[in-house]
Image (spheres, rainbow, N blue to C red):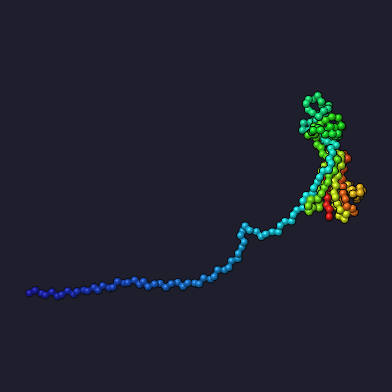
Amino acid sequence: MMQSQSPQPTVTVSESPQAIASTSPSPKPKSTPLSPPKPQRAEPPADQSPESAPEPEKPAEAIREVESCKVTMAKISDPNPPLNVRSTPNTASNENVVGQLKNDTFVTIRGEQEGWFQISTPLKGWISVKNTDSGCNQKVERVSFGRGGNAATISDRFVGTGSHQYRFSLAKGQTLTVSSDRGDLPIIVAPDGKVMGDLKDSQQTWSGKLSATGDYTLEMESNFKGYKYSFLVEVK
């Protein structure tokens, strides 16, 4: 007799529904209100500078005009000494050489001709001008103040003896001041020919009020081998 088999229990597996991801939107960040920008101070461009006041016009330099110049002495200055003294003003031959002079020898000038000095001491003859050191021994010079100016510096030198005169046209009531930068003060001569002031050898400045209108002469003198000088003239 066959035994009936008992039915096997059936296991039913129920599928669990798949999890659905949540896609809900994330909350938006709160926006912070921006503060208005601070006003900035406007600055001028770097290449611009504030306008400066124009500089005052400088006084013009004094005008100096030589009215007369005479050379009466010179000093021998030959790069190849001694210097030949010739009987005639030419170098055609050495037959006209009458003597020679050492450098630094002072000579007396009698005349000048086309680059030659005619000398009388210490020898008589002719020497080349370019081989000497010379300048105006007797000089008269007119000095005028430039536009807007009231001062002039006078500088020169003597080679040997001589006299240099500087003439200024000045007015009564003005104050004349003369200051020495080198050498002695010049002699100051009024329009009437009288010497003004009692200058001393060591005095470096003189000042005085003018009593007349006319030409005032400032004179430098040399009684020996010469020298350099410089002085300042001011008028107020």
Nearest to the observer: residue 141 or residue 33: 141
Q: Residue at x 28, y 73 (%)?
A: 17
Percent position (x, y) of residue 51?
A: 67, 59
Percent position (x, y) of residue 211?
A: 90, 54
Q: Residue furthest top?
A: 95
Q: Residue at x 46, y 73 (%)?
A: 30
Could you tell me if residue 53 is visible in this image? yes
- Total count of labels: 0
Quarter assignment of residue 133? top right
Q: From the image, which quarter does the N terminus lie in?
A: bottom left
Q: Residue at x 11, y 75 (%)?
A: 4
Residue 99 vertical placement versus 221 (above, below): above
Percent position (x, y) of residue 11?
A: 21, 74
Q: Residue at x 66, y 60 (%)?
A: 50
Quarter assignment of residue 174? bottom right
Could you tell me if residue 226 is visible in this image? no
Nearest to the observer: residue 228 or residue 153: 153
Percent position (x, y) of residue 3?
A: 10, 74
Residue 177 vertical placement versus 13 (above, below): above
Position of 32 compared to 100: left or right? left
Q: From the image, which quarter does the C terminus lie in?
A: bottom right
